[in-house]
Image (cartoon, grey):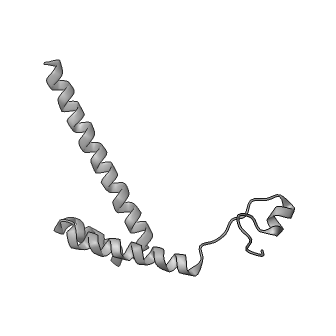
Amino acid sequence: CDGARPQCSECESRRSDCQYLETETTQVKRKHADLEEIFELMRTLPDKEAAELFGRIRAGVEPRDLVEQVQHGNVLVQLACASASGSQESRKSSQ
């Protein structure tokens, strides 16, 4: 691979898609951002949730996976809250 973008000459000659891996710099920046996010979560989450997060850290879960789990979990909580409030509103309007 000659590193040409958007497609290297090798892939271009084979008419296949290029799939570039993250550069080391990009990996370090992403990991740094993930660790900052985890630090902020540990600082701001309620004690019980921070303890659960710490348990996952101790269990060896990768930083990127932790951030995604927390973000995914927050989305699920928000959806559950929205669904619950929507159910309550529809019950009120049907009464």
| Residue at the extreme top | 95
Note whether 34 is above or below 91 in the view shown: below
Tell me if 80 is positioned left or right of 46 in this view: right
The answer to which quarter of the image holds residue 50 is bottom left
The residue sitting at 13% across, 18% down in the picture is 95
The residue sitting at 33% across, 51% down in the picture is 75
Quadrant placement of the N terminus: bottom right
Give residue 7's position: percent from left, percent from top: 74, 64
Is residue 91 shown to the viewer in this render?
Answer: yes
The answer to which quarter of the image holds residue 58 is bottom left
Note whether 2 is above or below 89 in the view shown: below
Query: 13 or 5: nearer the eye?
Result: 5
Note whether 77 is above or below 95 in the view shown: below
Tell me if 53 is positioned left or right of 91 in this view: right
Give residue 53's position: percent from left, percent from top: 29, 69
The image shows a total of numbered marks equal to 0
Tell me if 2 is positioned left or right of 82 in this view: right
The answer to which quarter of the image holds residue 65 is bottom left
Give residue 39's position: percent from left, percent from top: 29, 75
